[in-house]
Amino acid sequence: MTNQQTTDFMLKLLNWWPNLYRENDPKDMTDAWAVSLADISYDAAMAGAVALSRTMKWPPTVAEICEAAKPYIGFQPDLMNVRVAIDAHEELGLPLPPWFYAAAQKYAAQIPPDYQPAALLQGGLLNGK
């Protein structure tokens, strides 16, 4: 989330928890939360906050928001996921998943040559073309 998104997010939280700032400076608290929420999307944080609003009477901490957002954060493939997708495609003929191309570009330098499918190399995906 950006600082502006965090500001908007915290203003919405005030609808559920009017005492969210608990005598803290709103700007300082928003800046601190923005650092903690930087790698969480606005939508995931908001979905987590909605879930918390159904059960929490007191304002959540930023840690509780981060934990509640986890189920709403999209799948983030790593190098192992890329290698398994390549194996499944090459050996079993399964289609490559929708996330594959972005992940393959991200990890292109780390994929060993024997895992680089010829079709992807010819298309320039893994060699910068």
Image (cartoon, rainbow, N blue to C red):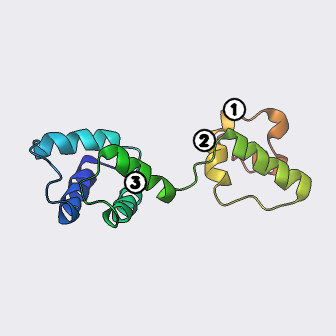
Q: Which residue is labeled 1 in the image?
A: 110
**Residue 107 location (% of width, % of height):** 65, 38
Q: Is residue 127 left or right of residue 58?
A: right
- Residue 116 found in image quarter: top right
Q: Quadrant of residue 42?
A: bottom left
Q: Residue drawn 27% across and 54% down?
A: 5
Looking at the rendered structure, the kind of residue marked 1 is: Gln
> Is 12 in front, or is 103?
12
> Considering the image in quadrants, where does the C terminus appear?
top right
Residue 62 numbered mark, or none: none
Q: Amino acid at mark 2?
A: Lys
Q: Report if the CB atoms under discs 1 and 2 are less than 8 Å apart.
A: no
Question: Is 21 displayed left or right of 43 in the figure?
Answer: left
Distance (Cα) linking label 1 and label 2: 9 Å
Foreground: disc 3 or disc 1? 3
Label 3 near label 2: C-beta < 8 Å?
no
Q: Toward the viewer: 90 or 50?
A: 50
Q: Earlier in the sequence, mark 2 or mark 3?
A: 3
Marks 2/3: CA–CA distance: 20 Å
Q: Which residue is mark 3?
A: 41
Which residue is depicted at the point 29% across and 46% down?
Answer: 61
* Label 1 element class: helix
Q: Secondary structure at mark 2?
A: helix
Query: Which residue has dot 2 on it?
Result: 106
Answer with mark 3 or mark 1, whichever residue precedes in sequence: 3
Q: Is residue 74 visible?
A: yes
Image coordinates of residue 55 in percent, x first then y, are 34, 63
